[in-house]
Image (cartoon, helix red, strand yellow):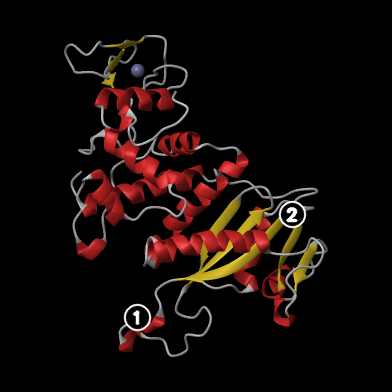
Amino acid sequence: MTATVNLTNPIFTDLDAARAHFEAIRWPQGAYCPFCGQTDTVKGLGGKSMGPGWFHCNDCRKKFTAAVGTIYERSHIPMTKWLLATHLMCASKKGMSAHQMHRMIGLPYKTAWFMAHRIREGMRELNPRGPLGGNGKTVEFDETYVGGKEKNKHANKRNKRNIGGTGKEAVFSLVERGGKVRSHHVPNVTAKTLRPIMDDQIATETRTMSDDGGARARHGEPNHHAVNHSIGEYVRGDVHTNTIEGYFSIMKRGITGVYHHVSAQHLKRYLAEFDFRYNERSALAVTDVERTEKAVRGVIGKRMTYKQPVGGQDQVSL
Ligand SMILES: [Zn+2]
């Protein structure tokens, strides 16, 4: 596989190159039958009768391509454009809006919007599941708020009590220093809401750190340390929340600068996208190419059944 991928790479313009690239990602050990799972009697059909990319399984006697069982199957969008969209989303630090994608890829805006959401959904599946931290490790956690500005809302939709997070969507994130992040769209940031998330996602013996606000949810935990922002304390020895605050600043610059408005309904997918890029970041020795390949792997096992809710439109035909 190529060491670097730029926009002149043939996988973004040449269907044969795109297909070969996807086959190598989907089938690193060689083609297997998506219906019965075996590899022994799978043979390439050579492209003469069916066109290129078709294989035949001699056990179940079915024909298939590498796209079967992925979002590329039955998609009218060529694989070159799926790969380009995935690359653009993976290589742009703050993400890429559907508007910009529509201009760069040359597809209708609604199609670009749909693709971006499918790609995010693939990223969500790839984000890590098990607990963060462990013995000798530190996990920082904090909350932030995202959403439309109150002053931009129509007067009768404005929330007069909009102080701090009211009227916005709450996001709770945990990050392991030198490791991975997890973000959650939460209904509120009460201890009752946050405790089960932390119980589930922080390994025992982890040192945890937050500011004084977050400390309430970790009350009574002997390994928890808090800096007291309310009295102007931000660092005390190695106790600080700089890692999670740095992450929030990337996320918020992306959400306000690139996506402008993110609806509550789709917020979890945007969070998955930002978490994915952070978790596959270059500081952890992940290259743009590896990050994109991983995101492409996320589309495997997905189907094209997502309804597009924008403006009450019916499912867009791809
Ligand atoms: Zn088979």
Q: Pointer 2: residues within 10 angstroms few (<14), some, or many (20+)?
A: many
Frontmost residue, 257 versus 61: 257
Frontmost residue, 192 versus 292: 292
Q: Is residue 282 above or below residue 34?
A: below
Disc 1, ligand 1: is the CB inside 8 Å?
Answer: no
Frontmost residue, 71 versus 199: 71
Name the residue: 41% across, 27% down: 26
Residue mark closest to the camera, 2 vs 1: 1
Name the residue: 35% across, 51% down: 117
In the picture of the structure, the residue carrying the numbered disc 2 is 138
x, y (%) of residue 78? Answer: 24, 35
Instruction: Classify residue 124 as left or right of residue 62.
Output: right
Quadrant where the C terminus lies?
top left
Look at the image and tell me whether residue 68 can be seen.
no
Name the residue: 43% across, 71% down: 147
Quadrant where the N terminus lies?
top left
Secondary element at tag 2: strand
Q: Amino acid at mark 1?
A: Asn
Q: For the image shown, how many numbered marks are present on the structure?
A: 2
Image quadrant of ligand 1 equals top left
Q: Amino acid at mark 2?
A: Thr
Q: Is residue 88 above or below residue 265?
A: above
Name the residue: 37% across, 44% down: 88
In the picture of the structure, the residue carrying the numbered disc 1 is 152
Instruction: Classify residue 268 as left or right of residue 313.
Output: right
- Ranked by sequence position, the earlier of labels 2 and 1 is 2
